[in-house]
Image (spheres, helix red, strand yellow):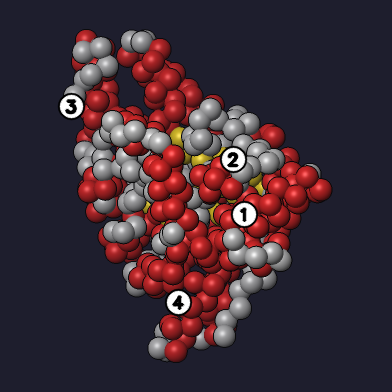
Amino acid sequence: MLDFSDMSVIDVHCHPYPRKNKLSADEWVDEVSFGGGSAEYLQAGGIEVDAAAMAMLQRVKRDTLYFRYMLRRLAEYFQVEATVDAVVDARNRAIAEQGYAAYAHGLHQAGGITALIVDDGHPLPQVDLKNFRAQVGVDVVPIFRIEVLIQQLLDADCGWAEFQRDYDDGIASALSEGGYKGLKSIIAYRTGLDIDPRSRSADQGMVALEQIRRARGRGGDAVKQLRDHLFCRAIERCIDYGAPFQVHTGMGDWEVHLEACRPALLMELLRYPAYRACKILLVHTGYPYHAEAGYLANVLPNIWCDLSEGLPFAGNAAARIIAEVLEMVPISRVCYGSDTYGSPEPFYSSALLGKQALAQALRILIDDGFMSRAQAYDAAKLILADNARQLYGI
């Protein structure tokens, strides 16, 4: 058996969470769950959200294997029965007795988590990172989501000269003075990953913004042209500052256009000569299209992949996903990530699942003669923390 339980973890992709001392069982489930929709989702479709609908939403969230695994691990941690009511009651009681900061730090410490690389573009309004650092008790490394800045500039109704200047200055300020260690883009959610590398042309941004302004924000193809242009500008800023660029690929919440999020769509952009120096991290390794991300990371030397979302939200598939990622991705280009949010509990259970699944995947490679036991431990250290340290200089 391989045992990685004592190894440190750097979560390369996650989100800060606001402090919430006491939660009801249903509130806690909503904070920590993935999938299952929401009341807002049903209401937007004209569906009445009554007590029966809310009970249905709670049921599907609690019935995922991910949620059940988290519940069992937390029940062991609190030494209570593995029920939602018992775990939430133990959580609330521990926070009241210990204080929120001590409680959160204890969970991160128990999971071996030493640093969180956080995308503070979610949730909105943004969580105050100074307060967040104080309450989690581990190193917090923020990355700057460019879509937040883009939306602010679109709302400002400024012309291209001002838009271009404020966009470049905003990124430069974040990376040079704001404490941010990299950029993040969710362009996959907005207009997809089929980005023409020539979108950086001098006139594309100006023409696209003018069309959007004339159409009062409903610019059609111009919206994609503007976002593609700004994405390419962000790559150049990352090269200038030697900063990594996280790019959402693959699965997300119910709003995502999954076919437009396939990593393979990035191939032409990432091998464009002017962009080859940029260090790109493919968020979620494109899951469920992780074979595509694996190929990109194999043939393009500045591509990293993180394991988030497939781990932990695919539950018992985590070991299989890791094994499939390692089919092509160099071990030095794989990073642990969770995409967790909401409350400290899923950060803890995800770290446990990550170590467990990684041990299962590497055990098979040992048995099949692909590595020795010592090499497996070295690989685990790289994937769980050291690759992130190297990529982000922490």
Mark in front: 2 vs 4: 2
Report the quarter where the N terminus lies: bottom right
In the structure shown, which secondary structural element does the residue marked by tag 2 occupy? loop
The residue indicated by pointer 4 is 361
The residue indicated by pointer 2 is 17
Task: Quote the CA–CA distance across marks 4 and 3.
Answer: 44 Å
> Considering only order in the chain, which callout, 1 or 2, is on the residue closer to the N terminus?
2
Q: Residue at x 31, y 59 (%)?
A: 288
Residue furthest right in the image: 97
In the structure shown, which secondary structural element does the residue marked by tag 1 occupy? helix
Asked where in the image residue 215 lies, by quadrant, the reply is top left
Task: Quote the CA–CA distance across marks 2 and 1.
Answer: 22 Å
Q: Position of residue 358 (x, y in %)?
A: 50, 72
The residue indicated by pointer 1 is 85
> Considering only order in the chain, which callout, 4 or 2, is on the residue closer to the N terminus?
2
Q: Position of residue 193 (x, y in %)?
A: 27, 43
> Considering only order in the chain, which callout, 3 or 1, is on the residue closer to the N terminus?
1
In the structure shown, which secondary structural element does the residue marked by tag 3 occupy? helix
Mark in front: 3 vs 2: 2
Asked where in the image residue 132 lies, by quadrant, the reply is top right
Three-letter amino acid code at the position of disc 2 = Tyr
Task: Quote the CA–CA distance across marks 1 and 3.
Answer: 49 Å
Three-letter amino acid code at the position of disc 3 = Asp
Res 255 visible: yes
The residue indicated by pointer 3 is 221
In the structure shown, which secondary structural element does the residue marked by tag 4 occupy? helix
Three-letter amino acid code at the position of disc 1 = Asp
Q: Residue at x 58, y 56 (%)?
A: 84
Three-letter amino acid code at the position of disc 4 = Ala
